[in-house]
Image (spheres, rainbow, N blue to C red):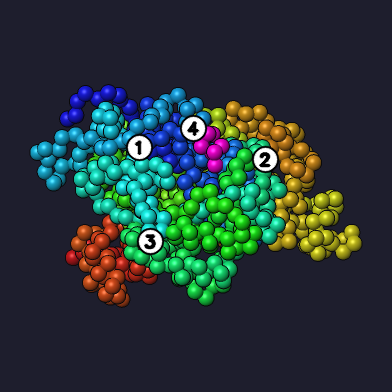
Amino acid sequence: MVLGFTEKYDVVVVGAGHAGCEAAMAAARMGLKTALYTINLDLVAQMSCNPAVGGIAKGHLVREIDALGGVMGEVIDAVGIQFRLLNTSRGPAVWSPRAQADKKLYRAKMRQVLESEPNLRIKQAEVVDVLLEDSAGRDNEAPPCRVLGIRLRDGRTVEAGAVIVTTGTFLNGLIHCGENRYPAGRSGEPPSVMLGEALRRLGFEIGRLKTGTPPRLDARTIDFSKFQVQAGDPIPTPFSFRTRAITQPQTVCWITHTNAETHRLIRENVHRAPLYSGQIKGIGPRYCPSIEDKIVKFPDKLQHQLFLEPEGLDTNEIYVNGMSTSMPIDVQMAMVKSIAGLEHADMIRPGYAIEYDMVQPTELRPWLETKKIANLFLAGQINGTTGYEEAGAQGIMAGINAGLRVQGKPPVMVGRSEGYVGIMIDDLVSKGVDEPYRMFTSRAEFRLHLRIDNADERLTPVGFKVGTIKQHDYDAFLAKRERISAVTKFLLETRLAPSSRAGREVYRKLGLMEGEQFTAPSPLTGAQLLKRSELCIDDLMEWINEGLSARVGDDLPRPLGGEGVRWSGTGEGLQPANELSHEEARRVETDFKYAGYLEQQEKLMERMKRAEARRIPDWFDYRKVSGLSREVVEKLTRVRPLTLGQASRVPGITPAAVSLVNCYIEIFQRRAAEQ
C-alpha cells in the first residue's frame, strides 16, 4: 500500500487531448472530484493534425458524444469556420457533418469549458507511473489488483479512485522527417517515456503505430486564383443538439491536385522516406496514407486531390490536407512548389511522421477498464485508434464508466445497435488492431437506425441516467420528443383534403388532380404522402402547422418543465423556444419514408440482441459442425467466443458460419436433454 499521497481525487485523467477532455468532463459532471493532468496547459485539446471535426461516420461519433453529455460538439459549433453536411447525395443514414475549426479558438474554448466545471481541476505535470495496491500473496484466481493513484515526475503521488490514461501519441513518441528523427510527443513537445515504460512493466501487450501530418504553408505566398473554391453550406448544420445557431464568421477552403512532376519528385526520392527506408517500424493508417504511400501504392493514378484549409481566421497558416508526409524537408519544399498556385509558397512547418506506443485493446473490457488492473481505464489513441472523434467517443465512455466504478455502480455499455461508439469499442476489444482504427459507416450493421438526427433519442436517456446530461438539457430533449411525437401523430391520423389550397398543390404535384377534380379513390394521410418519392416534408409544413393549430389551438401537450408548444402558419415550422427545427422535420420525414426498412432493421437488431444473449457452451466442439471450413474451426477453437455475437465478430467468421454453429448448439442441447 502506498502512503503519503499529496492530493486525493475520485477520478484522475492523464492527458488533455480530445479523449482526456471528454473523460474528465464526464466524470466531473457526474459529481465526482476530478483532476486532469497534462504536460502543457497551453495545449489542451490541441488539434495536432487536421484542424477539423467530423466527416463521414466521425460526425456520427461527435453527435453521439453530444447526446451522452460530452462537449466536443458544443465547442466546434462555437469556433467552426466552415460547416458542410457530407454525403447528402445519398440516403440520410450516411449524412455526416464536418466543420473546419479555428485551431487556436478551439483550444481556448475547450479550456474555458473545462475550467467552468466546478468539480474539475486542470493540472500541469508529467505523470510517470500508476500506483497499485500490494498484490503479494494473490493467487491466479484472485481478482485483479487495483489502481490507487499516480506518480508525478516531481515525486508527488496523487490518490485516485479510478485512473484514465489518454496519452495519445506521447508514449515513447518518435518523430521522423526524412533521415532525421527525434523523441517527441508532438512537434516541439517532449514524449512520455517513463509512463510508457511503466505500462510495459505492468505486463500490457504493447504495439507500435504511426501517424503523420502535412506541411503548413503561408497564405500570403499562395496564388489562390489557381484553385477551385470550396464553400461551406449556406445554412450550417450544428453538431450539438443544444446549439441554436452558428454565429462564428465563415470562410472557404480550396481544392487542387498533385501532378506528374509531384509524383516524379516523390518516386525519385522515396528511398529517403522513413516509411520506405526501414526507419519507421510502426504501422500507419490504411485509410489516411501519406502522399508517398499513395504514389507507391497507386502508380496508375495521375493525380491526387489536395485541400487547402485555413487553420484559423486570424492566421496565415494553411493546412495541406491530403499531403501527409515524412519526406525530407528539401523534397517537401519541391513537392509543394510543383503544384500550380504554390510555386512561390513558403513552408511554415514541414510535415512529419510520428511513431508511438499503444496498448492492444483486447487488454480491455467492453467498458474500457483494463482486465489486469481494476479501476484503470484507457481511451483514445493509446487503444490503437486514429482521429479526434474516435478519441473523444472513447473518452466520454471511459469517463462515465470510471465514475460509475467509483460510485460502486455497474458499467454502461452501448450496443452495436445503439450507437457508433458501441460499434467502435466492440471492434477494438473483440478484434484488437493491427493498424490505426478509423470509424466508417460501413462498420455499422444498422446504418439507417444509427443516424445523426436521432443520436439524442438513442443515447441522451443514458447520459441523463448517469448524470452527464443535466435536468434542463433533458427537459429540452423531452420537449423535442413531444414536438416530434405530435407531428408524427398528426401525419398518421390526418388526411389532406383535396379541396384545400395545400391539397390542390400537393395532389397536382403527384398527378392526382385533373383541373379541380381529385382523381384518387380517397384523400391520403400525411404518412402516406411522405412515403411518395415526389414529396418532402417541406411540401406539407404549412398544412401541418395549420392543422395542428386548428386541432389544439396554440397549445400541445406540455413538455416537462416547459411552456405549451406554439405552432405558426408561416410554413417555416414552429416558432422560437419550442420551434420544430429543420432537422427535426427531416427526421420525421425519414422515419416515414424508410419505415419499411427501419422495421426490417428492428427485427435484425432483436436477432442480434438474442445472439448476444446466446452463450456458446464451454463443451462445444466446432470440429463436429459439418460445413465449417478448417480455417473457421481453427479460429473459433483458438478464440473460444463466449456468445454467438462475439463469434460473429471474430475476423474471418461469416454470418453463415455463426448460423450453422447456432443450429448445432440447439441440436447438441436437444440430444443432451433427450439422453
Quick one: SS at disc 2? loop
Quick one: SS at disc 3? helix
Identify the amino acid type marked 4.
Answer: Arg
Identify the amino acid type marked 3.
Answer: Pro
User: Which label sits on residue 274?
Assistant: 3
Which picture quadrant has residue 27? top left
Identify the amino acid type marked 2.
Answer: Pro
Of pointers 4 and 2, the one earlier in the residue sequence: 4
Distance between the alpha carbons at the discs numbered 1 and 4: 16 Å
- The nearer-to-camera label among 2 and 3 is 3
Distance between the alpha carbons at the discs numbered 1 and 2: 34 Å
Which of the pair 381/487 is nearer the observer? 381
**Residue at coordinates 18% horizontally, 65% vertically from top-left?**
675
Residue at the disc numbered 4:
111
Distance between the alpha carbons at the discs numbered 4 and 2: 21 Å
User: Which label sits on residue 14?
Assistant: 1
Residue at the disc numbered 2:
249
Of pointers 2 and 3, the one earlier in the residue sequence: 2
Quick one: SS at disc 1? strand
Which region is colored magenta? Answer: 103-110
